[in-house]
Image (cartoon, grey):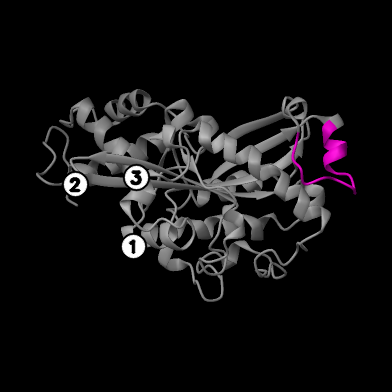
Amino acid sequence: MENTKRGDEIPWGETIPHVEKYAVEALEKLEAIDYETSKSATDIYVKFRELHNEVELPENTFRKVLSDLTKDKNSRITKQESRNGYFLTTFSVLRSEDISENNSTIKGAEALLTENDIFPEPDSQFSENSNISKREFLLYPLLEQWLSDQNFRVAKNVFNKRSNETWGNPDVAGIKVEEHLNRFEIEIATIEAKPSKDKWGNNWRKDIFEAISHKRYANRVYFCIAVKFGDKLSEMSDIKYYCELYRVGLILIEINPSLFIKYEGKNISVNGFNEDEKELIFITEKLPAPYDYVPLKYQREFCENTLGIKNITELFNFGDTTKI
């Protein structure tokens, strides 16, 4: 990329790399490094103008390219959709080819793990009748409803379909379908849920990489944990760092203290929370899941092998038909 001299027009065909360079520089100056310090497109453009006032770059072009860059998995620029703000991730997103489907190790991520962080087989820490398994199971209907509220068609009991290789099945999954001129675009969202910290201990790094592995087929990926309402997790800053680093959304299920005692009890039921109890549960999207492009091949494999969708008719009959 050629350097743009002050007063010069950006060379033809180099608008995108130049906007990315200027936007990154502006975000660094604005110290927009996480969702709490995210900045609007206007803030970024104003800062760019302060730094490069004579560069000929219309604001509408800058804003359009800035928005498009958030969909580029190799760009550090991320969009905080719920606040319509932008910030920089520390590194670019983990690429799908960095995930080995044979042994579930993640290349390039080993340095972030301690020597004792060994990747477990899926669900090896849960027995079919254990209280830990029940606690996680109770979260699924809550998250299915939450994802449905985000206008996704939600798959029921997707966690039971272990047909998509190691770490291949999320706990909750949903799809959106857009049709235009007989062409279809599918957006896949997944959630990996874990019970409270007292039950999953210090294994959150392994758990979050299980969520990251879903990025090979999902456009948006969430990691979810349940906590007692009002509790402050000492690991939260580290968890948020990992989520931002690998472009994973973060959901907290905050449970009223009185209900949390029941949730943590030894004799919990798998019948789910009743309507009164649901009023004591709050689901918060602490970090949105950025959208990432996924090749059609991997979307198709997930839809066929996990969701059981093999043709257009099954696609449009899938889930809640009011969501499209």
Categorize mark 1 by other alpha carbons within 10 Å: few (<14), some (14-19), many (20+). Answer: few
Work out which residue is located at the far bottom of the displayed protein and give it.
Answer: 102
**CA gap, disc 1 and disc 2:** 38 Å
Residue 260, how many percent across, how many down? Answer: 83, 36
264 in magenta: yes
Residue 246, how many percent across, how many down? Answer: 50, 52
Q: From the image, state whether disc 2 or disc 3 is nearer to you.
A: 3
Does the residue at mark 2 contact the one at mark 3 (Cβ under 8 Å)?
Answer: no
Which residue is label 3 attached to? 71
Does the residue at mark 1 contact the one at mark 2 (Cβ under 8 Å)?
Answer: no
The residue closer to the viewer here, 49 or 84, is 84
Tell me the element at label 3: loop
Range of residues picked out in magenta: 259-273
101 is higher (above) or lower (below) than 203: below
- Dot 3 or dot 1: first in sequence order is 3
Q: Which mark is residue 3?
A: 2
> Can I make out residue 94 in this image?
no
Categorize mark 3 by other alpha carbons within 10 Å: few (<14), some (14-19), many (20+). Answer: some
Q: Which mark is residue 297?
A: 1
Tell me the element at label 1: helix
Disc 2 marks a residue whose amino acid type is Asn
Residue at 58% x, 67% y is 110
**CA gap, disc 3 and disc 1:** 18 Å
Tell me the element at label 2: loop
Disc 3 marks a residue whose amino acid type is Lys
Magenta span dominant secondary structure: loop
- Assign the C terminus to one quadrant of the image: top left
Residue at 52% x, 69% y is 165
